[in-house]
Every structure is written in structure tokens, then in C-alpha cells.
Amino acid sequence: MQPEMKTPIVTLTTDWGDRGFFAGMVKGALMRLIEGVQVVDITHRLEAYNIMTASFVVRHGCLGFPEGTVHIIDVASQQPYIVVRSRGQYFICSDNGLPALVFGDAVEAAVSIPVQAGGIYNFAAYNLFTPVAARLLGGTPLGDIGPQHPQLLQRPLPGYLQQEEYYRIYIHYIDDYGNAYLGMSYEEFERLRQGRAFVIQVRGDMYVTELSRDYRSGGNGELRLTVSATGQLELALNSRSLAQFAGLKVNGSVLLKFKD
């Protein structure tokens, strides 16, 4: 038996938006099925079908919860539906490439959620995921939810790529302020840098040559390179949306060059 949490927690990470009834349906089902449940909205405003952005949000927004927490992730959902256990937490989602991007080698176990032949699962988060969450939080062992799931579907996660004298760094996430989170961590940056001067080029006439400790140093509209709360390099404009100003998008890239 799985140990029951003193206060059962279920989080929701979805691309449903905040104008419809989907969140209400799922929350109502969870509260009906799980006594005393605390439902936490991570976000419902993910771009539809954007697995890259969703994986970034889950990786940095969900993994810090207490052991035993159940996370429902409904982005680009399709069969097969699975439950992944990682860091003592449970993630109910689709094997659509997102789990492999989030967990990498940190998967403790994964099982398939059985579906009925001919069943209609247009809203799997409601029809399938909520009763599975209730079973897990009620103490049902993961192995009783379904059979062991085979290897997770792999999707490439571009971080950065060395190309002759420079590095192409891919954009993993853009927040509501228009700041761009890069696919290179601060630790990786310093390891490659080795104390050298550098330049990061966002576009032909827009570049940065210094690392800032905050967003506010410098004048309004000035490009800043800083370190995000995730530990990754982050590009931002003071008091403006960099993504809007420079036309940046997830999976786009910037160029980094070190000066010897």
C-alpha cells in the first residue's frame, strides 16, 4: 500500500485556458472522489500542443512538491496514457514525449493506464486521470493501476550546439513578461566560458556582453543577460517584452561567442 498523505495534493498543468469549464469539471471530480484534497493550479495557459513549453513548466513548477503528490498533466493528450513515479511523486499524463523530456533518467517506475476497447476519451483528464489520482491517494500501489509501461517515447531537447567558433543556444521557454529562458545553465555557461569575455547576439543589431545580477540594472529597454530561478541563462529587456520586441519564440535560438 502507498502511504496516504496527511493532506492529499493534486496539481493541474494544462493547455485548457481559463475561459472554459474544463478545470471546473476536473476539480469537482477530484473533490468528490478525494476527501480533503488540495487542488493546486500550476497553469492552464500553456500554448496548445506545445510539449516543449509544457515540459519546461512541469520540470520547474512541479518537481518541488512533497512526496506523494499527484500531478495531472493534460497537454496534447493522446493514448497511451501513463503514470510516472519520480522523486516519490506521481505524474498522470500521456506518453507523447513530454515525460521523457521532464524526467530523463529519473523515472522510478511507469505504468500504462488501461482503457476500454471502443471507449471515448476526448477528455482523458476527467474520464481517466481523476479516478487514477483518487486511487493513488487512497493508497493503491502503482503496480495495481496498470501494467509496466515500456520505454518512454523520446523527443530531442535542443539545448545548445557548438558550431565552429560560436554556440547556438535554443530558447526553451518565454514567460509572461516576454523574457527568454535559454537551453544553457549558468553552470554550463561558466564551465565553457573559463573567464573569457563573451557576446550573445539576439539579432544582428542586438547583443549583450555582460552578466547582470538582476533585471533592473541599466536603463529601460536595455538588453540584460541574467540567471533565472531555474538556474538557466535568461535574456530580458528592462520594463519591456523581449520576445515581442525581438520576435523570439520557443525553439528559436541566439548565438554565443567567447573571445579569446
Image (tube, rainbow, N blue to C red):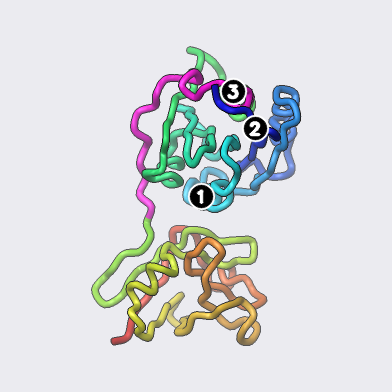
Q: Position of residue 250 (x, y in %)?
A: 49, 58
Residue at the spot 38% in from the left edge and 52% down from the top edge = 157
Q: Is residue 4 covered in magenta?
A: no
Q: Label 2 belongs to which residue?
A: 5
**Proximity of marks 2 and 1: CB atoms separated by less than 8 Å:** no
Kindly identify the amino acid type of the residue bearing the numbered disc 3.
Gly
Kindly identify the amino acid type of the residue bearing the numbered disc 1.
Arg
Kindly identify the amino acid type of the residue bearing the numbered disc 2.
Met
**Proximity of marks 2 and 3: CB atoms separated by less than 8 Å:** no
Q: Label 3 belongs to which residue?
A: 139
Residue at the spot 54% in from the left edge and 67% down from the top edge = 228
Find numbered disc 1 in the image and state the secondary structure of the residue it sits on: helix
199 or 17, which is in the foreground?
199
**Proximity of marks 3 and 1: CB atoms separated by less than 8 Å:** no
Residue at the spot 63% in from the left edge and 87% down from the top edge = 219
Which disc number belongs to residue 59? 1
